[in-house]
């Protein structure tokens, strides 16, 4: 259960570091975000949602059945788009209208 | 590395900026009653249980129900071990705090008449992915409220028998904080990570409850001599296998039942469907060889499946990711379920500080709310809001009393600084905090009713647990840190060990089995109403855990501390 950070996409804003409830994120000497111990991550995706550059991906550990897909989000005007990309490159997008509560 | 001391003064110190703590601060700000300082280990924007969000409010009085019905439900679910004074005052405030959250921007689903859409008798559906940022942003805008993020509180400052503040340290810089306050509210989380988790390897933190809630609030109360209650009523969640995502979203949300590998409905064979029985029945079916157990989702509609994908993204995105990356969703494949490791958490069961009707603890000047306050199970998110409000209202009343500022002498502060500094040396230590944590989880799993023993324990095993936990408590004091983050890890394991120790005494004291799986005592496998319609409480005196049995508080009664 963890995240991986694309060092090329990270702009070093530090916002992810601020929201991690486990204080797990740091910035390296180039200001890029790093996770101290990937196995300490709870999987809350706070950092994923905070990153406007889509530099942070969430994935499931192999020990809990992960198959290597990566999840990231994009926010635009009251909509939260959840993108899931499979190892073969297939992308699925689920959009949540934040003003309409879920009707499950 | 040596720590520099920084002092703070405030009227009300709130320890923990989660669900209860943030709501308590908003209550004071609204009344313009006092200055408040929230001290938070992470950052209040996403800290605590609500980090990922929540997709329903599980405690709400829906049309046709009453707060009295809610008390009846809690009493029945907790096998009568509840403080009716606390549950009743919590239930009475549920709808008002929900309105406050809606006013702050929380999206609650409504029908065409504008009424909230319910899920069963006590739940309403929300879009709560952003519930914590909404709360945090209101706190940040509130007048007279200051937030100190990334500071870990270690202990209360006690002077003349009163709690007059707390000590803590920054997790970034070598700073030791001495925070003096006229009243203190403990609003930290419960305790996770005491037992070996479902996924002990790479995904060790993929757990039901926040892995960053280490029981610090309980531990500092235990060390200061506060009375604690009902630790033996552990909470064990029934979850989707591997992802440890909630099952209620499916089971109650779309109304499917639990089945075993033969496709048989099994839950009702084990008694009335209560929280503990849903879990216990699953454990029993697995033990008799009828597992794996599932939620019977095959055949739900495509629309229901799509709605589930969205509902989980609002609370536990791992589950949606799991379905999508496997290319098969719940409409085509039943969802396997399992029990988690046990937690101590007063928002779900009765564990926590023994408080009076107003949420004052047995230590003068200290109040408790949310997961650390005992006697009032099934609070969930809204109940924790109500308790935050009630605790801080009591603290405001306390501030109105003639107040004599307590002197905290320099020597006491110096001793407190030294007790933290002793871990910060360059000397090597044989063990790391992580080694001690792993050893603790193994002991609790083996000897105090973890997953591997089907949650069952007996007196002989608990004696082994006591011995080993005491050894680890000694080892933990010899740990060394070379950074503030590592210092935090040391304190987290020290606090967890403190909670484990008291928990073992509580498990040993209740000589019956009151709640299957949650407290499954092999020496006393039956419920014994004749002797055990009582609270098991504890207090640490002169280093020893002393058990106190107390009577239930019934309907219409209130409770004051007097002995």
Image: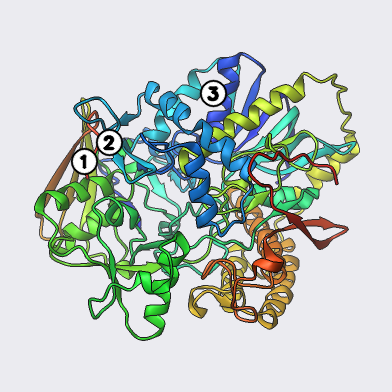
| Location of mark 3 (residue) | B26
Q: Decide: marks 1, 3 in contact (CB < 8 A)?
A: no
Q: Say left or right for B123 vs A104.
A: right
Secondary-structure class at tag 2: loop
- Alpha carbon distance from label 1 to label 3: 30 Å
In the rendered image of this protein, does residue B78 appear above or below residue B72?
below
> Could you tell me which chain the residue with mark 2 belongs to?
B
Using the rendered view, name the quadrant where residue B243 is placed: bottom left
Q: Say left or right for B24 vs B403.
A: left
| Location of mark 1 (residue) | A103
The residue positioned 16% from the left and 50% from the top of the image is: B304
State whether residue B320 appears in this view: yes
Give the percent coordinates (x, y) of residue B546.
81, 61
| Location of mark 2 (residue) | B117
Q: Residues within 10 Å of mark 2 (few under 14, many from 20)?
A: some
Give the percent coordinates (x, y) of residue B447.
62, 78
């Amino acid at each position: 259960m963890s995240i991986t950070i694309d060092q090329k996409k990270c702009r070093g804003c530090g916002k992810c570091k601020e929201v991690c409830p486990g204080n797990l994120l740091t910035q390296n000497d180039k200001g890029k975000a790093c996770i101290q111990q990937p196995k300490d991550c709870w999987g809350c995706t706070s950092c994923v949602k905070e990153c406007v550059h889509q530099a942070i991906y969430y994935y499931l550990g192999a020990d809990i059945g992960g198959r290597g897909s990566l999840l990231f989000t994009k926010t635009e005007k009251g909509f939260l788009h959840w993108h899931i990309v499979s190892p073969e490159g297939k992308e699925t997008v689920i959009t949540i209208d934040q003003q309409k509560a879920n009707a499950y | 590395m040596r720590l520099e001391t920084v002092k703070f003064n405030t009227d009300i110190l709130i320890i923990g900026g989660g669900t209860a703590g943030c709501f308590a601060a908003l209550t004071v700000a609204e009344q313009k009653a006092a200055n408040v300082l929230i001290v938070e280990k992470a950052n209040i924007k996403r800290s605590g249980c609500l980090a990922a969000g929540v997709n329903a409010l599980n405690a709400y009085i829906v049309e046709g129900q009453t707060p009295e019905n809610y008390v009846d439900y809690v009493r029945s679910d907790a096998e009568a071990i509840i403080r009716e004074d606390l549950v009743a005052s919590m239930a009475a405030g549920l709808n008002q705090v929900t309105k406050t959250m809606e006013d702050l921007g929380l999206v609650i689903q409504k029908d065409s008449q504008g009424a909230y859409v319910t899920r069963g008798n006590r739940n309403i559906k929300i879009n709560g992915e952003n519930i914590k940022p909404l709360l945090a942003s209101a706190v940040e805008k509130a007048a007279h409220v200051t937030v100190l993020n990334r500071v870990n509180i270690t202990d209360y400052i006690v002077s003349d028998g009163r709690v007059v503040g707390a000590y803590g340290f920054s997790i970034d810089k070598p700073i030791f904080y001495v925070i003096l306050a006229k009243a203190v509210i403990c609003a930290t989380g419960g305790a996770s990570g005491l037992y070996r988790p479902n996924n002990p390897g790479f995904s060790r933190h993929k757990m039901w409850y926040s892995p960053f809630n280490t029981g610090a609030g309980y531990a500092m109360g235990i060390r200061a001599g506060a009375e604690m209650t009902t630790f033996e009523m552990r909470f064990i969640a029934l979850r989707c296998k591997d992802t440890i995502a909630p099952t209620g979203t499916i089971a109650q949300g779309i109304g499917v039942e639990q089945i075993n590998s033969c496709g048989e409905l099994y839950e009702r064979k084990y008694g009335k469907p209560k929280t503990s029985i849903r879990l216990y029945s699953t454990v029993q079916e697995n033990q008799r060889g009828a597992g794996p157990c599932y939620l019977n989702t095959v055949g739900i509609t495509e629309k229901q499946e799509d709605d589930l994908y969205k509902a989980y993204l609002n609370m536990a995105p791992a589950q949606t990711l799991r379905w999508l990356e496997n290319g098969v969703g719940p409409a085509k494949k039943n969802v396997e379920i399992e029990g988690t490791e046990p937690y101590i958490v007063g928002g779900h069961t009765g564990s926590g500080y023994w408080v009076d009707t107003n949420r004052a603890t047995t230590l003068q000047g200290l109040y408790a709310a949310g997961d650390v306050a005992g006697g009032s199970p099934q609070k969930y998110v809204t109940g924790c809001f109500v308790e935050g409000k009630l605790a801080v209202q009591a603290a405001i009343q306390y501030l109105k009393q003639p107040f004599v500022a307590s002197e905290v002498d320099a020597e006491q502060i110096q001793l407190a600084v030294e007790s933290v500094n002793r871990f910060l040396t360059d000397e090597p230590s044989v063990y790391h905090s992580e080694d001690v944590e792993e050893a603790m989880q193994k002991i609790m799993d083996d000897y105090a009713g973890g997953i591997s023993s089907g949650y069952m324990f007996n007196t002989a095993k608990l004696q082994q647990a006591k011995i080993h936990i005491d050894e680890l408590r000694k080892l933990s004091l010899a740990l060394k840190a070379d950074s503030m983050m590592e210092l935090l890890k040391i304190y987290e394991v020290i606090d967890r060990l403190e909670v484990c120790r008291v928990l073992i005494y509580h498990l040993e004291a209740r000589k019956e089995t009151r709640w299957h799986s949650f407290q499954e005592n092999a020496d006393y496998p039956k419920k014994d109403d004749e002797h055990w319609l009582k609270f098991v409480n504890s207090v640490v005196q002169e280093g020893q855990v002393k058990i106190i049995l107390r009577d239930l508080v019934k309907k219409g009664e209130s409770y004051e501390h007097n002995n």
